[in-house]
Image (cartoon, helix red, strand yellow):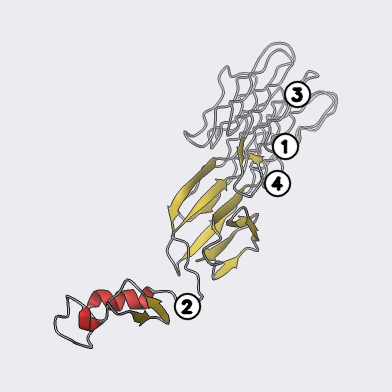
Amino acid sequence: MSYRYKGGRIDPNAVTPSNSSQTGAASATWTLQERVQASVWPTAGQAAAPPSIEYLVVSGGGGGGTTNNGAGEGGGGGGGFVTASGYQVIEGYTYTVVVGAGGTGGNAGGSTNGSQSRFGGISPYGGGVGGGTNARWYGGSGGGANYSNSEGFYGAAGQGKNGGAGSSSANYGGGGGGGAGAVGGNASAGVGGNGGNGSASSISGSSVTYAGGRGGGTRGSSGGAGGTGGGGLGSRSDRAATSGTANTGGGGGGIGEGNGQSKIAGAGGSGIVIIRYSDTYRLATSTTGSPTIATSGGFRVYSWTSSGSITF
């Protein structure tokens, strides 16, 4: 058997046309299959584009719940959290990357769900806003219920957990927002529910927890604690609600105004998009959005904290 050059590189698996069973007698004519092989065979010294990638997509966390009276509102839910390997990509195709913003932390019902992040066709829901006068309680992870609701709000299957229940007992209490890894805590008399914990991922090269829920607010002295993964504190009589950590998808704290504390709920944290593939494959031909690009543990890792794109 003799070998043949294809695209500047020897292909030991291809026979010459004269030895090909498709061409019959000695001939300089290539078959259609051989022409296709020649067009895609890598040039000598040039690594191939990856056939598939691993991804982590986390959407923005939900804002904390508010009402006009600040009587113990729910914490915001963590943003939808999805991760998997084996996502097939096409060489030369440009994939859009969207990093979702955290939900706003308003007053008198002005809070919102988190915005969706996206890589290609992967786009989890934004975190659910905490219960208050809002009607948008459902999200990647559910927002905590306000003091008048005995059941937390739902998270999306495979993306996050439900929020915790509220309490109408003395000094009221809002439920904690759900996290990617755990449900939000229920409130009790004068105590806001704790936010649910997020989920950890090592796709970046080190273990980081994302999409934690926020604590519920209270008029008492014990606002809910934030869940791990960017979730923060609910308001209490001597403490204002806090916002989710940027680029974690953590939810915003619910309010529980008292003693002059602000009736502004905490905003949700923005999301993040990370992909990686084996470093035996070449770098992407182009990116936008200024991703952080690193090589770690045998992988090429691209991390976006603002929207952009990638072409393999």
Upstream in sequence: badge 2 or badge 4: 2
Of tags 2 and 1, the one toward the viewer is: 2
Of tags 4 and 3, the one toward the viewer is: 4
Residue 266 image offset from top left, x and y in percent: 72, 37
Q: Distance between the residues labelled 4 and 1?
A: 12 Å
Q: Residues within 10 Å of mark 4 (few under 14, many from 20)?
A: some
Relative side of 98 to 38, left or right: right
Question: Label 1 sits on what residue type?
Answer: Gly
Would you identify the image quadrant in which residue 236 lies?
Answer: top right
Of all residues, the one furthest to the left in this rendering is 24
The vertical placement of 40 against 144, above or below, is: below
Residue 202 image offset from top left, x and y in percent: 61, 44
Q: Name the residue under label 4.
A: 246
Would you identify the image quadrant in which residue 104 lies?
Answer: top right
Q: Which residue is drawn at 17% across and 75% down?
A: 21
- Secondary element type, mark 4: loop
Upstream in sequence: badge 3 or badge 1: 3
- Secondary element type, mark 2: loop
Of tags 3 and 2, the one toward the viewer is: 2
Q: Name the residue under label 1.
A: 266
Q: Residues within 10 Å of mark 2 (few under 14, many from 20)?
A: few
Q: How crowded is mark 1: few (under 14 residues within 10 Å), some or many (20 or more)?
A: many
Q: Distance between the residues labelled 4 and 3?
A: 21 Å
Q: Distance between the residues labelled 2 and 1?
A: 55 Å
User: 148 or 3: nearer the eye?
Assistant: 3
